[in-house]
Image: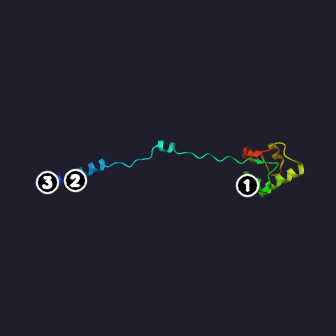
Amino acid sequence: MRTGYLSSLVFALLTSLSISANAAPAPKAETGASTATQEVAPKPQAVKVDLNKADAATLQRDLVGIGEAKAQEIVAYRDMNGPFAAVDELLEVKGIGKAILDKNRERLVVN
């Protein structure tokens, strides 16, 4: 008789724990709708560098793959040959290849 009473108590205890665990409200996960309402900051516009006006420091800072030496070469080429007529003329500068030009084409202008 004791065994039956003890089993009933254990069963009742486990049942009440199970019910309370299932009845507890689940934490709310953030839905995709809440992230859709957040405003997305626009990507900053790429800086446009004028090959005919930029100094060596500007070229070095704003162009990819252009260090101090290449920036000075660009300025020296411009001083010796006059202003650039087209962005593709940058290939004539010592140390500037097609890969560097392609990486920077969207950043370059000639005015």
Q: Residue furthest left?
A: 1
Tell which circle, 1 or 3, labels the residue nearer the N-terminal end.
Answer: 3
Circle 1 — which element? helix
Residue 5's disc number: 3
Instruction: For the residues labelled 2 and 1, say whether their Cβ atoms are less than 8 Å apart.
Output: no
The picture places residue 77, in percent across and down from the top left corner, at 86, 51
10 Å crowding of disc 3: few (<14), some (14-19), many (20+):
few
| Comes first in the chain, label 3 or label 2 | 3
Q: Nearer the viewer, residue 1 or 14?
A: 14
- Between disc 2 and disc 1, whose residue precedes? 2
Left or right: where 37 falls relative to 66: left
Frontmost of labels 3 and 2 is 2
Residue in the image at 31% along x and 49% along y: 24
Q: CA distance from mark 1 to mark 3?
A: 83 Å
Q: Which is more toward the observer, 10 or 80?
A: 80
Q: Are circles 1 and 3 on residues that touch, CB within 8 Å?
A: no
Residue 62 position, x and y percent, is 73, 52
Task: Please give the residue where the numbered disc 2 appears in the rendered image.
Answer: 13
Quadrant position of the N terminus in the picture: bottom left
Foreground mark, 2 or 1, reads 1
Pointer 2: residues within 10 angstroms few (<14), some, or many (20+)?
few
Image quadrant holding the C terminus, namely top right
- Name the secondary structure under disc 3: helix
Identify residue type, mark 3: Tyr
Query: How was the colour assigned to the protein in this rendering?
Result: rainbow
Name the spot of residue 60 as percent of width and height, x first.
75, 55
Number of the label disc, if any, that sits on residue 61: 1
